[in-house]
Image: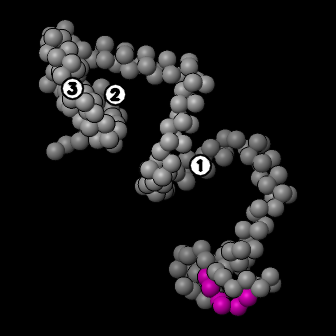
Amino acid sequence: MPLTSTEAKRLGLSMYFTGVPCKNDHVTSRYASSAECFFCRKDKNQSVAVKEKQAAWSKNNHEQKLKIAKERYERNKVWQHLRGRTRWVAHKEKVTESTNRWLDNNIGMRAFYANKRRSAKKYRTPAWANLDAIKTIYANCPEGYHVDHVIPLQGKNVSGFHIESNLQYLSASENSKKFNKYQIT
């Protein structure tokens, strides 16, 4: 770790370590942008005045806040995905409860997504599709598995048909991971 803020900035790092205590006797890393130690900044950011100022800024700059959040997400997409996945594994019941509460409180949105899905199936089922074969595939789905579309009906880059040759059985976890992506094997 660099010993000066200048060296840290030159290396493109946000922190440096001098080993010298700050004015509050913290011996820790300091920010290159302000020379504040990690703990002093943490204390400052937790103060009521700072929180009120941040809340006021957020309220008055909603569009800019959304733009900043989107840029941060794009820069850290892999980390955000991993963080969400880790949260899900660690707090499965709590996340499920939260999701179910959202669904209960947003019945209109729930209906919207269900209708969107139903419509996608309807419009992607051609006249020549073998509906009996499709029904048989759904009826014979093994316990703990989902019927999945190999080429998704609502994919980002490609959309498939709702036909028997585009259906497969996937475990619930595999289907959740796949979502609406087309995986070339």
Q: Earlier in the sequence, mark 3 or mark 1?
A: 1
Q: Is residue 134 above or below residue 63?
A: above
Which numbered mark, 3 or 1, is in the foreground of this view? 3
Quadrant the C terminus occupies: top left
Q: Residue at x 54, y 27 (%)?
A: 103
Q: Amino acid at mark 1?
A: Ala
106 with respect to 86 (left or right): right
Label 3 Cα neighbours within 10 Å, binned few <14 / some 14-19 / many ≥20: some
Colouring style: one colour
Residue 92 percent location from the top left of the image:
47, 45
Between marks 3 and 2, how big is the CA–CA gap? Answer: 22 Å
Q: Is residue 77 visible?
A: no
- The span picked out in magenta is 16-21
Task: Describe the element under mark 3 as helix, strand or loop.
Answer: loop
119 with respect to 184 (left or right): right
Residue 18 percent location from the top left of the image:
65, 89
Splitting the image into 4 quarters, where does residue 147 fall?
A: top left
Per the image, the residue denoted by label 1 is: 69
Q: Amino acid at mark 2?
A: Gln
156 with respect to 27 (left or right): left
Q: Is residue 170 above or below residue 42?
A: above
Per the image, the residue denoted by label 3 is: 141
Task: Describe the element under mark 2 as helix, strand or loop.
Answer: loop
Q: Is residue 15 visible?
A: yes
182 with respect to 35 (left or right): left
Q: Earlier in the sequence, mark 2 or mark 1?
A: 1
Q: Residue at x 68, y 74 (%)?
A: 38
Between marks 3 and 1, how big is the CA–CA gap? Answer: 41 Å
Q: Is residue 174 above or below residue 121?
A: below
Task: Describe the element under mark 1 as helix, strand or loop.
Answer: helix
Question: Mark number for residue 154?
Answer: 2
Question: Mark number for residue 41?
Answer: none
